[in-house]
Image (cartoon, rainbow, N blue to C red):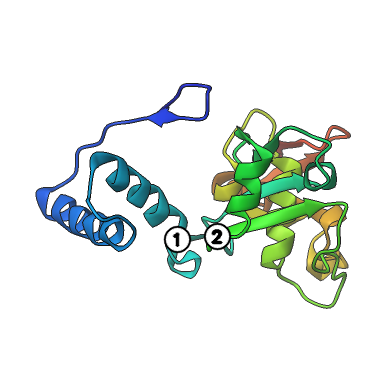
Amino acid sequence: MLDDGEGRTYGRFVIPTLHAEALKKALFAHAALTHERVTSQSLGQAFCDYILRYPAHRLPQRGGVNATVVVTIPLAVLEGRLAACELDTGTRISPGAARRLACEAGLIPAVLDGQSQALDLGRTRRLFTNPQRIALGLQQRTCRSEGCDRPASTCDAHHRTRWTDGGNTDLRDGVLLCPSHHRRAHDPTYRTTYLPTGKVQFHRRN
């Protein structure tokens, strides 16, 4: 897919005919609900609606959080003082688009500086919650291992201080690591160093 930088993305794909027929039938059915005559434009709109309305609970899981789009909406945007928002992928969108997305299924509006769910649970539970994983993804963006750029959506939430050693399940103690580096963090043959920059270094022990 290619983003033209003006709010549109172009792409082509090749899929088995069976799946293409199933997709075509779904799009025609969706387009026929809202348009008197099905056109290429109404089918395109139906495709967009089909993506946004796909049940979020049926999406694949990675590190306990499904592939849900997170829209970061600063309070200033809601008040009309900023001209753009940002998805958790880094793509910038208009405030109007963000407000529409926040009303759709499968999208989580992360309104900064506003009231939200409790994210710091300390010692009350061992595993990071979905809201915590989402917040870590917004903060850290990628795997924290130095030189690794795997996106946050593919990473696991790891305790800097192991929970069994008294670590807390909160944002201050959480670090995102891709599966490969997460395994390394638990491998006794490696020493883990947390840098002031927020990055993580792994060194094989002698």
Kindly identify which residue carries mark 1: 53
Q: Is residue 27 visible?
A: yes
Earlier along the polypeptide chain: callout 1 or callout 2?
1
Residue 53 or residue 33, whichever sits in front: 33
Q: Amino acid at mark 1?
A: Arg
Q: Residue at x 88, y 68 (%)?
A: 166
Q: Residues within 10 Å of mark 1 (few under 14, many from 20)?
A: few
Q: CA distance from mark 1 to mark 2?
A: 7 Å
Residue farthest left in this picture? 17
The numbered mark at residue 104 is 2
Q: Secondary structure at mark 2?
A: loop
Question: Could you say which quadrant of the image residue 34 lies in?
Answer: bottom left
Question: Could you say which quadrant of the image residue 186 lies in?
Answer: bottom right
Residue 106 or residue 104, whichever sits in front: 104
The numbered mark at residue 43 is none
Q: Position of residue 160 (x, y in %)?
A: 80, 53
Q: Position of residue 92 (x, y in %)?
A: 63, 33
